[in-house]
């Protein structure tokens, strides 16, 4: 239960988490027989204080292991209750913050968690390889498939190399090349979306960024093989849609999917991006999983562990694997020749509305 990185709205959790860590260390000392350190600011000549179950900031330490374990369990229950309360009413802007959490699982993490026999493929056969776009064949449950996904990177060097998940034209062309190969072998395709948007640099534009994404939109719609797409973190604009033309589209519970980021929207509408304008933009964009589901843009929401995927990546991987296997099992019953038409009709329905009579 690390307090190394906390979001602003999670700060009420910090005292409880620190106290639990302190008591767990104390329990280890009691078990090993090592002496407990004196609490800072306490008088060693005074009688030992009794630990307060109600006050997570109490510096007092229980005298025995049974009392320590009891106190830990009660604090953990308090922590779960507070965490549940914080996350059940997340604002759209705080949802964006969770989606950007530095410890949130990324494409390569999910590959390690549930993709067996992963064989990575590189290069677009035209310019080079883009590390921001991961592609490779793997086995998910009983299914052999192609996995495609954005990757932001973990270390500073990796983040710079991946441009923080913003793919170049060669990334989208690599993805399309591999998807066409998968279709030739009748293998389903699973894409994991996690990008703030396509890379907007001069070189990317010179090499045809918009054209590469447009070709992906066209050619993915024509593939005669099942396609699943899941927004696992950020789903920003065409950079996300470039690998998300799928038969079934889902979002993780605390991800976001929109035509523009809240900061970008705020900068356009109010000429400045700050806490107030970002919050207003996030509210207006309807970018949460719940909003996208109600608007019919996505087909399903994959539940995250309590407190977000970053708190329990293993459980999140199990939830996502289960959803993928269930959807592929269902899609495999469809005739491959009919999938492009159904896919076309799915996307044509987006934005349809009927005017009420005046």
Image: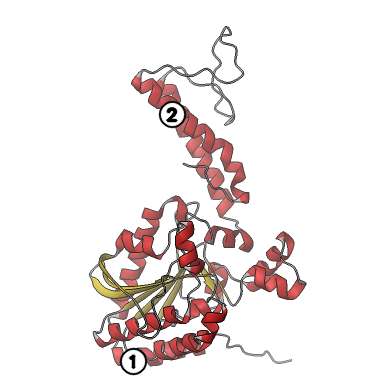
Local SS, label 2: helix
In the image, residue 11 sits, relative to residue 338, either above or below, namely: above
Farthest residue in the top direction?
Answer: 45
* Residue 155 image point, x, y percent: 46, 56
Mark 2–mark 1 CB contact (< 8 Å): no
* Foreground tag (2 vs 1): 2
- 144 vs 345, left or right, is left
Which image quarter: residue 31? Answer: top left
| Residue drawn at x 48%, y 75% as measured from the top left | 167
Q: Which secondary structure, mark 1? A: helix
Q: Is residue 297 visible?
A: no
Q: Which residue is mark 1?
A: 338
* Mark found first going from the N terminus, 2 or 1: 2
Q: Residue at position x 34%, y 21% from top? A: 32
Q: Position of residue 115 (x, y in %)?
A: 29, 65
Neighbor class of circle 1 (other Cα within 10 Å; few <14, some 14-19, many 20+) is few
Question: Residue, x 36% and y 54% (percent of image)?
Answer: 314
**Picture residue at 54% right of the left edge, 18% below the top:** 50
Neighbourhood count class around disc 2 (C-alpha, 10 Å): few under 14, some 14–19, many 20 upward: few
Distance (Cα) linking label 2 and label 1: 60 Å
In the rendered image of this protein, does residue 3 appear above or below residue 347?
above
Q: Residue furthest right?
A: 270
The structure's colour scheme is secondary structure
Coordinates of residue 160 in the picture (x, y in percent) = 49, 64
- Marks counted in the figure total 2
Residue 81, compared with residue 49, is above or below; it is below
Q: In the rendered view of the protein, which quadrant contains the C terminus?
A: bottom right
> Which residue position holds label 2?
25
Query: Can the viewer see residue 284?
Result: yes
188 vs 168, nearest the viewer: 168
Residue 175 position by quadrant: bottom left
């Amino acid at each position: 239960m690390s307090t190394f990185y906390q979001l602003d709205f999670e700060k009420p959790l910090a005292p409880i988490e620190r106290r639990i860590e302190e008591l767990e260390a104390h329990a280890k000392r009691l078990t090993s027989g090592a002496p407990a350190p004196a609490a800072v600011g306490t008088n060693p000549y005074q009688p030992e204080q009794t630990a307060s179950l109600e006050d997570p900031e109490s510096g007092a330490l229980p005298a025995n292991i049974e009392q320590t374990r009891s106190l830990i369990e009660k604090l953990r229950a308090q922590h779960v209750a507070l965490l549940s309360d914080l996350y059940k009413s997340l604002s759209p802007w705080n949802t964006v913050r969770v989606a950007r959490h530095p410890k949130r699982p990324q494409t390569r993490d999910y590959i390690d968690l549930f993709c067996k026999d992963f064989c990575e493929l590189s290069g677009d056969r035209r310019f080079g390889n883009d590390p921001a776009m991961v592609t490779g064949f793997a086995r998910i449950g009983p299914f052999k498939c192609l996995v495609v996904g954005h990757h932001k990177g973990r270390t500073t060097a990796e983040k710079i190399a991946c441009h923080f998940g913003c793919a170049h034209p060669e990334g989208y062309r690599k993805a399309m090349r591999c998807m066409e190969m998968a279709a030739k072998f009748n293998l389903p395709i699973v894409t994991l979306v996690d990008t703030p948007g396509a890379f907007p640099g001069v070189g990317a534009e010179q090499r045809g960024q918009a054209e590469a994404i447009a070709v992906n939109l066209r050619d993915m719609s024509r593939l005669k093989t099942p396609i699943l797409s899941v927004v696992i973190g950020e789903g920003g604009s065409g950079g996300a849609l470039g690998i998300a033309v799928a038969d079934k589209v889902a979002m993780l519970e605390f991800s976001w999917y929109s035509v523009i980021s809240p900061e970008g929207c705020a900068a356009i509408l109010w000429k400045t991006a700050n806490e107030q304008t970002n919050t207003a933009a996030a509210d207006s964009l309807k970018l949460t999983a719940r909003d996208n589901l109600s608007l019919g843009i996505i087909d399903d929401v994959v539940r995250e562990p309590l407190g977000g995927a970053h708190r329990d990546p293993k459980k999140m991987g199990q939830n996502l694997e289960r959803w993928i296997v269930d959807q592929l099992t269902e899609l495999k019953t469809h005739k491959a020749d009919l999938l492009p038409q159904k896919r076309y009709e799915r996307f044509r329905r987006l934005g349809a509305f009927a005017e009420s009579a005046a």
